[in-house]
Amino acid sequence: MPDDDGGGGRGWTSSVLSELGRGCVAMDVAYLRLLSDVAERSPIALWSVGDVGSLSYLFRGLSSSSLSLDQLEAYVGALCRVGIAYETAVAWSRAGAGARGGTEAARSLLLLAEACGAPPDGRVVDVDPSSPISCLGGTFLPLALESIIGHFISSPSHRRRRNLDSLSRIARHLSTCAERCPSLLAGDDAALSASTRACMAMARRLVPNDDDSDDDVSSLRLSALDVLSTMCAVPWIRRSMTKSGSSPSPRCVGEEGRRTTTGEGGGGGEGSPLLRFLVRGYDDDACKRGEEEDRGEGGRGVLYLCAELAVSGVDDDEMAWSDGHAAATNDGADGHWEDDRVALHAESLLESFVENLGGSSTLPSIFGIVDRLLSGPTTSSSSWRNRRAALSLLERCLVAAPVTFAPHVPAAVDAALRSIGDTSPRVQYQALQLLGSLCCADSSGAAPAAGRVRLAVRERYCATILEAVSHCVKSRCTKVASHACGAIVSYCRGGNGSEDCMVPIDKGLIAPYVGSLLDALRSGPLSVDVSDPNSVNGGRLAVLVRAIGAVACLADAVGEDFLPHYAIMGGLKACSLFGLYLSDGVIKFVANLKNTHEMAILRGSAIEAATIVGQAVSGPDGENVSTYVADASEIVTIAATLLDGGDADIIPMDQLLAACARIAAVMGSKYVPFIPSILPHILSRATEKLEVSITDDDDGKNADDRGEDGTESYTISIPGVGAKRVKINTMQLEEKAQSARALYEHARALGKEFGPFVDASVDAFLPLVRCEYSGDVRSTSAQALCQIFKSACLSAVDGNASRVGQAQTLLPVLARDLVEQLSKENDYEDEIENRYAIADALSEIMWDAHEHRTTDGERVAQIAFADARDIVRSLMTLIQSCLVRRSTLISEMVNSSFDYDEIARCEDKAMSESEYLTHLVDSVGYQLKSLGPSFGLIFEESVAGTLTQILSPSCPISNDVRAKIAAICLLDDCVEHCGSSMANKYGPMLLEGIKDALEDERNSHDDYVELKRVAVYGLSQIAQHAPKSLPQAMGQDFLTKVYNIAKEVETVPKDDIEHIALVENAVSSIAALVLLRGSPLFDSLSDKSRLIKLFLCGLPLEEDFDEAKV
């Protein structure tokens, strides 16, 4: 009986626990498993009727020394399940959800589960050492796990198979517990040590014998390593391991007074003894005490074990792998197959260990392993496995610890380039994979992204890398050739550690090599004869798809410089009709064609590539568009014909719509006649009813899975409801997100010409902003809506009177819905991109409403006071939450001083929150500017309090420079736009912020420069709108400071000044303070000639439009 709303569940549970007591103490397997079932089905009731004392009674039977492994497995399973039940009960108590009856919709289940406060995957990501389950774990888990270790080590071989099954179940218990109840395993030092030692023993000491399969033993070893990896990913556990002396020796299990303390055992910066045990495989403290048992395992830490499985876990039939066909889709299927799953799992675990334990703690050990793997004998028929594994380990380290890895990039590039010439195609493939990852990790643009370092891979090795890759695209192994094309794509994409960053790379790093790369592609994969489609096998077809993608990326990277190679357009158009012909306005298959999914992907890739090439050669300002326009018309005609046919087996619809959007961007108003043919298909995908079903989880699998039919299902266990299976058509979700992207591009490309289609588009996409099942759908729909609104505004500005009313009607509807959805978005770090996209859409809508005016000077859309009041109140709550998250990240950076990669990850997250904060602040600011003095009441009610906190030295968030920038920006706007009364009232607060911002004249970090810039701008507003609030002495001090900033313009050409926006604001501020009649310091300085000269040197002011008006 599950939990219920009344006392029935608790009464039933109390009765069952009373009956279970004697059997559990007797270590009866059936009773222990029944206890597990009770804990799983009635977690709230269990912890309502029981406490740590009464539940401890159930686990007192462990003292017996003659327990079977089945008994121990059932015991650990029950203990873990009771711990998980506690976390479930606590989560529901916090959410106030209580125990409820059944629900009717999958949406209700999802929202109810989310109310528990746990991440979507059900993980608990913190440890509470003072919790009851930490007490239970510390009391009972160490002895249980020590008994298990001793049991399977001493078991005779004839019982090994049964023992292996029991150990596998124990590993599953611990794995589930590590995810959903880490406090049980790590809330107590003894429990943490015991859990670590037990998992290490299973991972290190299990080897297959004649009765065991390699896969069974490897799976168990991986399960044990997976438990350790999951534990290390918990912040509390990670911190306790990586700080010196903060955790006990792994040998000190259940021994009072023998805990390692800070300074004991040495190590200093090497972290705790437990960390050294994990990484190096033995513990110094245990050895000092004469406990030499672990010496035989020395060096066999988790990194070695993962590497060992990465070598042995790949299929040794290299010829079969090489003869297999490349895959047309970029899902990683080329590089491995089913028999490589052990190696792939081991490599992913190694990456997790490096990320969570820190590069400085782990990379030295891994580099030693890599050296041994690469320098070993090459004569053995299986030695390629060593070399393949070494390259894969290097890639995993690069991804997990890019900052620590940076000094080793030259050696990694050298290893990859040498390995491309290896006789083994599997090694060649892995070398290409490593080169591609190095390019993705390489920063692009003016500076690396936050927390990243410049690797300069392209700058140093461009010619060598591209020459090696061009050789591989002609490989007879289709998997190698396909991956070489993928390496070209990785090279052309901008890096900064994100594969989809898409920051343009410097043309000079690719333009000189485009011709030779295209020659290699033409003589290799592009040499396929497409006139006979049935003669092209799956492998060659897949390589052709990847080669076409490489062509598109080359064109995108060099833009109009691709014009000399435009002749390739003919081949791309031919591929877009691969196996097809156009007759009487209908596209048909050629006779006897065996159409396949791969063929459809080829056509889609070709039509997308054709539009990318056309957009690239047209130039940023359309200077070469005449070259492309005829081909563009032909392509869009093909696309419209296919869309009308509605056959996704010919070309995937998402690729068709993406191609149409690019053509729209080039053709502009000439594309309008095609809209009636294209838009209905975009809107129909957006409005299609989503298939969601909910059933009882009768099979008890309690696992997530992705079906081949484009669906995803997962189980939600809810007290009072039970286990429910939710099935969602994720393919439909992907199509909705794709349609939103296509609509965004169409609206952006057509601008005012999209006006007639605004209403239908809003009706289709506004409901998707509230899609509960996909953050991607919500974010892309929000972005589409902001472009739709912009089109409405542009159409109204163009003189279309009906569009003025349209924009005005849409503004409050869109603004309220977007703010409401932002308030509902969760704070999980993997959702930051969704929050950012929605906030960006909101600020863009507010900007368009503020900026666009009709010919008579009236705004096309004016926010109303009542709407602004509610919206700003919600926005300020979101701003406060954002600042709290940033404060937490800043604290983590201080606490992570041992690990530069962790600091970099925190900086990345903090930067993402900063960008999100900017959009929230901008949304408030545009409403303030639009309402002017009438915004004053809203400012006092909802804004001023938060700004006071930010600028207060005693507030924790006052150390956040981005918070100060936000506060000063809003105060600047208040003084400038809200009238003299508000300017005089909040001028003194702004002056305090300005004083603090200008104090440090040495810090040149970009954030501090921006802080000074907005502070100097605010000083100009004080001088103009609240001069009486500026004391003379303070004004003189400020004048000196801004003069010191501005004087650079007298000696350095403006084009060479690094922070020209700050300097120009300082020049303008001098004018506002001294030079203009009526300025606060006008009468205090009789000789203004030097300042006038400086002011004239600073003209014209070009960086800030508002300042230029001054």
Image: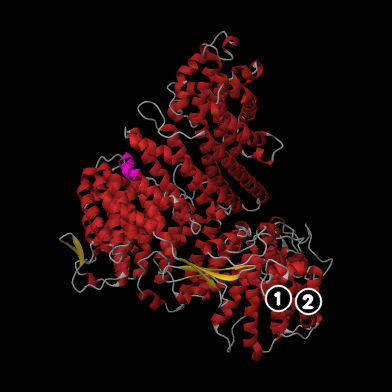
Which residue sits at x=32%, y=56%?
681
Q: Nearer the viewer, residue 507 or 990?
A: 990
- In this view, the residue farthest toward the left is 584
Q: What is the magenta range? A: 748-757
**Callout 1 amino acid:** Ala
28 relative to 1068 in the view: left or right: right
**Callout 2 amino acid:** Leu
Which type of secondary structure does the marked residue at label 2 adopt?
Answer: loop
Which residue sits at x=40%, y=75%?
321
- In this view, the residue farthest toward the bottom is 158
Compared to residue 592, the image places residue 996 above or below, namely above
Which type of secondary structure does the marked residue at label 1 adopt?
Answer: helix
Verify whether residue 200 appears in magenta: no
Count neighbours of disc 1 (C-alpha within 10 A) and say few if under 14, some if 14 to 19, many if 20 or more. many
Image coordinates of residue 60 in percent, x first then y, are 80, 77
Q: Nearer the viewer, residue 10 or 469?
A: 10
Which residue sits at x=51%, y=14%?
1076
Residues at circles 2 and 1 in contact by the CB criterion of under 8 Å:
yes
Count neighbours of disc 2 (C-alpha within 10 A) and say few if under 14, some if 14 to 19, many if 20 or more. many
**Which image quadrant: the N terminus?**
bottom right
Q: Nearer the viewer, residue 360 or 938?
A: 938
- Color encoding of the figure: secondary structure
- In this view, the residue farthest toward the right is 257
Quarter of the view holding residue 986: top right
Label 2 to label 1, Cα distance in Å?
10 Å
Query: Dot 1 corresponds to which residue?
Result: 78
Compared to residue 152, the image places residue 298 above or below, namely above
Which residue sits at x=55%, y=61%?
108
Q: Nearer the viewer, residue 636 or 699?
A: 699
483 relative to 389 in the view: left or right: left
Query: Dot 2 corresponds to which residue?
Result: 58
